[in-house]
Amino acid sequence: MQTDREARQQIVQIVNELFQTGHLTATGGNVSALSGDGETLWITPTGLYKGTLSEEALVHIQPDGSVIQGSNAPSIEYPMHVRSYRSREGIHGAVHTHSPIATAFGICNQSFQPINTDAILLADTQIVPWLMPGSQELAEAMGLALEKSRGAIMQNHGLMAVGEDLRGAATRAMMIEETAKLSLYVRQFGGEVSLIPDPWVEEIAGYASFM
Ligand SMILES: [Zn+2]
């Protein structure tokens, strides 16, 4: 179990990485980590520019959104974060990004074909139809989706990934975006598509539960 200080440090580190690589927009997307008590959350604040986030700007909240510590209001998407920790055992970090290519991939109802090993590992990525950001309906739909996969794309919005730690959640979000990008390139070339043969797909898929 990570300490609160580690949780805060890791959130700032991951937000910086996700911002610099285009997964978070100036105010879009949010990151949270489970607190050392295993019940409350540290989360990014609402509306604040993500490019210069400090540990002091983060908000410590109860599962109902009430603020324990911090002078900012928590992300309006906190219900989705709270629900995501209940989607499966051992989740300690959650990222919600506005990754553009993965979002477009979801809007166009695409699924990952076995074009590379990551695509096989991500084949269970869920697509969730549009629901209002910040709503309980979206939180519940995402919670159910994350019970089936550690990553889910929200149509017309972005994606969410969870992990045993925040690094794992961020890695999955980045993998989904990179694989959506490769899928886009494959379609743009437009020639005959060579997929990984089935026996290899089955073997590689066996590793999906470890990540
Ligand atoms: Zn969002």
Image (cartoon, helix red, strand yellow):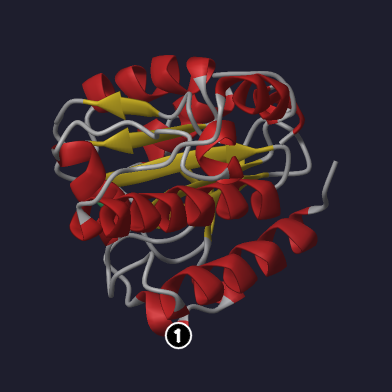
Q: Rate crowding at label 1 as few (under 14), some (14 to 19) or many (20 or more) other CA atoms within 10 Å.
A: few
Q: Is residue 108 visible?
A: yes
The residue singled out by tag 1 in the image is 52
Residue that extends furthest to the front in the rendered view of this protein: 192
Residue that extends furthest to the bottom in the rendered view of this protein: 52
Q: Quadrant of the C terminus?
A: top right
Dot 1: element: helix
Query: Which of 99 and 185 lies nearest the eye of the viewer?
Result: 185
Q: Residue at x 29, y 60 (%)?
A: 185
Q: Residue at x 45, y 80 (%)?
A: 20
Where does residue 84 sit, x and y in percent of width and height? 50, 28
Q: Please state if 101 lies on the left or on the right of 123 as rendered.
A: left
Q: Residue at x 66, y 51 (%)?
A: 166
- Above-or-below relation of 134 to 7: above
Q: Residue at x 57, y 54 (%)?
A: 170
| Quarter of the image where one finds residue 107 | top left
Query: Which of 183 and 126 lies nearest the eye of the viewer?
Result: 183
Where does residue 11 sit, x and y in percent of width and height? 60, 63
Where does residue 189 sit, x and y in percent of width and height? 23, 59
Q: Is residue 29 visible?
A: no
Where does residue 37 sit, x and y in percent of width and height? 76, 36
